[in-house]
Amino acid sequence: MNHTDSKYDNTPHDPAECQFCKRFHEFDLPEPLIAELLSSGVVLFAGAGISTEDKSVFPCTFYEEIRSELKVPETESLSFSGLMTKYCAQMNGRANLLRKIRERFEYTRSFPELYRIATRFHYELSTLFFIESIVTTNWDDYFERECGATAFVMPKDFAFWSLPGRKVFKLHGSITNLGSIVATSADYQQCYKRLQKGILGSSLKMMLATKTILYVGYSFRDEDFTRIHSMLRKDMGELMPRGFIVTLDRGDEQRYRELGLIPIFTDATNFISVIKQHFIEGKHMLPDEVFEEVSAELTIVRAAHHRLWDEFNIIDTPDILYAASYQDGLIHAFERMLGLHNSGYYSHIANITNAMLGYYELRKAKVQIRKYPDIAYIDGYTNGLLYLLHNHDIREMLPLYYIFGARQQPRSFDEFSHLLERAFTLHKSASRYARQMVQGRQCNKENVIHHPPFLALNIPK
C-alpha cells in the first residue's frame, strides 16, 4: 500500500501495510541535538534518499536506470560518478546525461502524486524554523520550492551569504543551472578540489565550525556521504563538529559511530515530525494545522470585506473607513502568514510575539498623532497575529468588523450595522476624522478606500 503522507492524503490506511509507516521506528530524542536546534546551531546535510531517489518515487534509482541502459553487469562494481562517466562516453557526451537528469525531474513534476512523495521530507521540514542552513548533494530545487530556501550554487553567490533567511548550499549543482551539475568522475574531482581549496570549501568549513551536523538521506555506502564526511574529518580535524545521522541502516551502526556520528534509526520525515511535535509541546512552535484555519478564516474575512462595501458607501457612512482598514490589516496578516508559511517564520512563537510587541509600540505612536485609519489597520493586523496563538474556540470569535470606541468589536454584520448607527457617539474624534478624510478626497458613493500594507519605514514584520 502506498500511503503518501497524512498532510496530503487523509485516506484511511493500515499502518502495518503502509510503506512509509513501516519505516517510522520509535527513537529517543538526543537532548544535545534538541538544544542545538533551538539555538539554530544545526546544519542539515541532505542526500538523495529524501528526494527522487527514494524507491517510493520511482521503481528504480537513477543509478539503476543508467546501469540498465548501458547493460553493465551486476558483477562490475562502479561508483555513481564512474557510471555517469561511462554513460557520457558511450552515449554521445554530457548533454545526453543532462537531458536524462532533467527528464527525470520533469516526469516527477508532471505527476502530483510523485512530486508529493519526492518532497514529503521538504514539506515536513519547511515549518521547522530552527533549520536555517542546509547543505545538499541533490540536484533538485525542492528546498527552494518547498522550504523557501535561497540557493547558493556558484562561488559568486557567497557574496550574499550573510543575508537573512534559510539557505541551501548545493555542493553538486542545481537542475535550474544545468552547467553546474556535478555527476561524472571529472566533475567530482573538480568539485572536491574547490571544496578543499576554494571559497566554497572555506565557506562550508566556516559555517560548520560552531555547528552540529545532521545527515539525512544518506547511507554508509553512499559515495557522496563518504567523500563529504572524509573530507571534513581530514580538513577540520579537532574542529569537526558533533554529528548525527538519521538512517534505516541498523547494520552499519558501529561504522557510523567509528566515524564520530550518532545514528538515529527511523525515517527522515518521521524524525522531523517527531522533533516538531516536541517543540510544539514545549511551546516553541505552532502545529501546521493552524495555517489551515488561517486559510479558511481568510476566505471569511474577504467575504466580510466585500459585503462591507456592497452594503454601505463611504459618503453616507464615512465610519466604515475604519472597518475597511481593520479588515485590510487582517487580510494582509493572513496573506503574509500563508505566503511565508514554507519559511517557518510564523510557526515560531517567538517571532509572532516579537512582531506583536513591535506593532504595539507603533500603535502608541499612531494614537499620539490620532492617525485613526492606521490604528484600525494595526488592530486588524495584530488580531491576525493573535489568531495564531489562540485555541480554536477563541479563533472562532475573531472580530470581522471594527468601530472606534466599541467595548467589544463585532464579528457579525448585524451587530456591526447596529453599532455603526452610534459611531459618532462612541468616538467623536475618530468619526470627525473619517468625515474630513472623505470630504478631503472628494469621494463619491462608488469609491472603495484601501489601506496598503505600509505604516512606516521601520515597520515591524
Image (cartoon, rainbow, N blue to C red):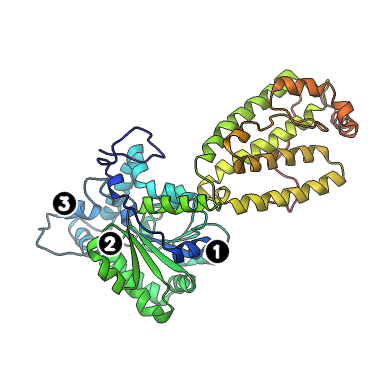
Mark 3–mark 2 distance (CA, rounded to whole Å): 24 Å
Q: In this view, does 296 lie to the left or right of 98?
A: right
Mark 3 / mark 1, whichever is N-terminal: 3
104 sits to left or right of 197: left
Between label 2 and label 1, give the one nearer the viewer: 2
Residue 318 x, y percent position in the rendering:
83, 26
Please rate how many residues cluster around mark 3, counting C-alpha atoms within 10 Å: few if below 14, some from 14 to 19, many from 20.
few
User: Looking at the picture, does residue 338 appear above or below residue 274?
Assistant: above
Q: Image point 49% across, 72% down: which residue?
A: 210
Q: Mark 2 points at which residue?
A: 219
The mark nearer the N terminus, 3 or 2, is 3
**For marks 2 and 1 on the same chain, the one whose residue lies earlier in the sequence:** 1
Where's residue 414, x and y in %? 72, 19
Q: In this view, does 299 lie above or below 455?
A: above
Residue 38: horizontal and vertical position, in percent?
52, 61
**Residue assigned mark 1:** 160
Q: Picture quarter containing residue 331?
A: top right
| Marks 2 and 1, how far apart at CA | 32 Å
Position of 103 relative to 40 (above/below): above
**Label 2: which secondary element:** loop
Residue where numbered disc 3 is placed? 69
Residue type at mark 3: give it. Glu
233 relative to 161 in the view: left or right:
left
Q: Which residue is depicted at the point 41% across and 59% down?
A: 29
- The answer to which of 38 and 148 lies nearer the viewer is 38
From the viewer's side, name the closer residue of 192 and 318: 318
Q: Which amino acid does label 1 sit on?
A: Phe
For the N terminus, which image quadrant? top left
